Image: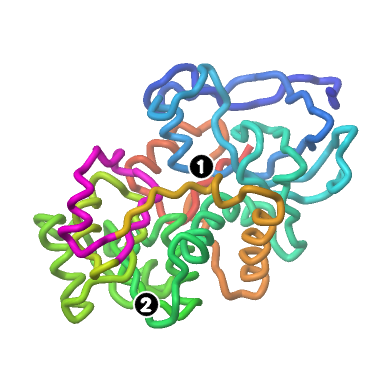
Amino acid sequence: MSVREDSDMKAVIATQAGGPEVLQYTDVPDPVLSPTQVLARTAAAGVNFIDTYRRAGVYPMPFPHVPGTEGAGEVIAVGTEVDSVAVGDRIAWAAGGPSYAELVAVEQHVALPVPEEIDLTTAAAIPLQGMTAHYLVASTFPIQPGQTALVHAAAGGVGGLLTQLIVARGGRVIATVGTEEKAELARRAGASDVIVYTSLADLTAELPALVRDLTDGVGVDVVYDGVGKATFDASLASLRTRGMLALFGGASGQVPPFDLQRLNASGSLFITRPTLGHHTLDRAETMWRAGELFDAVVAGSLAVPVGQTFPLANTGDAHRALEGRATTGKVLLIP
């Protein structure tokens, strides 16, 4: 199903596996809708670390391809079997079609209705990172009042939301960040203690010692770690007996294989490598997570910091900034 006489749109393609230089801004054909899809005119597209992994070839992908899966926009056409979304609706998506583009085809079951109180740019910053933070605190390790969490990269897109959600549930956050500027952002999000990891000569040795000093020698109940390789050993060493490491990303690289006996020797620890797709298995679960996030934003109890926006034509710069840890909050592309 084609909906425009002019059947080409602007988009970004990854021409081959490689660095940000492989991203090319060009004309591509409009998406062709299936009967169960809707077509959205993109207001903003989210930039996420998984996009960089796919661009770099860490995760298998066909090339060339249009990166991205997240965004928000207005519906301009619907497939013949669509019954829950209408033309003119404002939607967001975490698992839409290729999203670094002016137009995106989105399956109706993953189209998230955006409340009228939330602008589309803010809405684009919520689905992937917001629902990731939600499943981490509500499902992977459900935070209880009085528990303490170590949150790495607490000024980032997931980290800032995660910190707020933990505090809202009565938990305490010890945050790690890379700069003093980011430390202030983590404190604003609710972190009680902030460690600037770049000030440590030996992260693996010094960070756990600082964490134990802040927890009366006990360690934290859970570590939420989206950094991966660089923080993994320190994360394990910061846990209390029977604590959990929720490793949900690898911004610094993927964690290499390790001996499971380390978990036994370190205090019968738990470790999990969750992903958003397994926590949005059907529309009911997806709508529950997104609904709680949107409601919190409307109520003013959850702030969604959009740190940087880039024109779609400058997507390579956005990837460089994200991979160089030069960003705070959410990074968005504007067509």
> Circle 1 — which element?
strand
Residue at left offset 51%, top offset 62%: 139
Label 2 or label 1, whichever comes before in sequence order: 1
The question of residue 104 being in magenta is answered with no
The question of residue 247 being in magenta is answered with yes
Amino acid of disc 2: Gln
Which picture quadrant has residue 10? top right
**Residue 254, position in %: x, y?**
30, 39
Q: Is residue 136 toward the left or the right of residue 32 in the image? A: left
Dominant secondary structure of the magenta stretch?
loop
Quickly name the residue at label 1. Answer: 47
- Distance from Cα at disc 2 to Cα at disc 1: 31 Å
| Residue 329 is at least partly visible in this image | yes
Quickly name the residue at label 2. Answer: 147
**Residue 171, position in %: x, y?**
41, 77
Q: Is residue 170 toward the left or the right of residue 93 in the image? A: left
Q: Nearer the viewer, mark 2 or mark 1?
A: 2
Q: Is residue 96 toward the left or the right of residue 245 in the image? A: right
Q: Which region is colored magenta?
A: 243-269
Residue at left offset 41%, top offset 20%: 17
Which picture quadrant has residue 192? bottom left
**Residue 276, position in %: x, y?**
53, 48
The one of 219 and 272 positioned closer to us in this rendering: 272
